[in-house]
Amino acid sequence: MALHWDVVAAADLTTADIDAMFALMDLVYDGMRREAFEADLAGKDEAIVLRTDAGRLVGFSTQRALSVRVGEARAAGVFSGDTVIHPEHWGSPALLQAFARRYIVEREEPFWWFLVSKGHRTYRFLSTFFTTFWPDRRSPTPPAARAVMDAYATALFPDDYDAERGVLAYRTPKDRLRPGIAGVGARDLTNPDVAFFVARNPGHALGHDLVCLCDLAPANLKPRMRPILLGQPCA
């Protein structure tokens, strides 16, 4: 089944859209509260929305533009907030394709993707599609990248960011992946990226998020992934 994407300003989402978005979140996450969902949505700039041919909303990702001071410069980027796709469409690259075609373009300065990962599947987007990202099991996070991560996380989550561990350990109850989705089995742990995620974010089942960062430069995509995400041939 083909999925189609569109970018909609948060203020232009219809009541029907918001109802469908909340229903999707509630399907995948425990502890969802409508008022908290709407408050979070109000703080975003736009949403990438996935629909079927029949117009049914089956996935979305909310986005917020970021610009924070890091040392003497400003770090521009985008923060992906609530992100979900209906389980019927798990495995589809459509949502990431939409994100890539919206944000992965040539720029003179770095443009950062600030991503917080509640589950290993989200974290593995980075290891699957990008050459360089943080945190990465293969090498320590460079101080310059750590400074950007700290600046973004502190600006957005001042009360919940544990800089020493690089996680958002929420002080108040937070939505979490439903047990059948969040669970990490022995087979999952044979994947070194999954094992790394679990070690870095041991509170993932409680709804804690691992703070992640990636440069959204086309050159940072793995060459074999460019045709999938951007429709461009491998270099």
Image (spheres, rainbow, N blue to C red):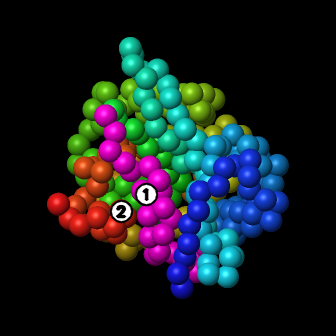
Comparing 197 with 122, the one in front is 122
Q: Which mark is residue 13?
A: none
Q: Is residue 24 magenta?
A: no
**Location of residue 16 with respect to 172 vertically, above or below:** below
Residue 172 or 101: which is nearer the viewer? 101
Q: Position of residue 103 (x, y in %)?
A: 44, 49
Relative placement, left or right, of 24 versus 79 is right
In the rendered structure, which segment of residues is drawn in magenta? 82-108
Query: Looking at the image, do the residues carrying marks 2 and 1 touch, with CB atoms under 8 Å apart?
Result: yes
Residue labelled with disc 2: 230
Q: Secondary structure at mark 1?
A: helix
Q: Amino acid at mark 1?
A: Arg
Please tell me how crowded label 1 is: few (under 14), some (14-19), or many (20+) other residues with Cα within 10 Å.
Answer: few
Q: Quadrant of the C terminus?
A: bottom left
Could you say which disc has been placed on residue 101 in the image? 1
Q: Secondary structure beneath disc 2?
A: loop
Left or right placement of residue 113 versus residue 19 in this view:
left
- For badge 2, the amino acid type reads Leu
Res 137 seen here: no
Q: Classify 73 as above or below 113.
A: above
Is any part of residue 71 visible from this angle?
A: yes
Give the total of numbered labels.
Answer: 2
Image spot of residue 222 (x, y percent): 25, 58
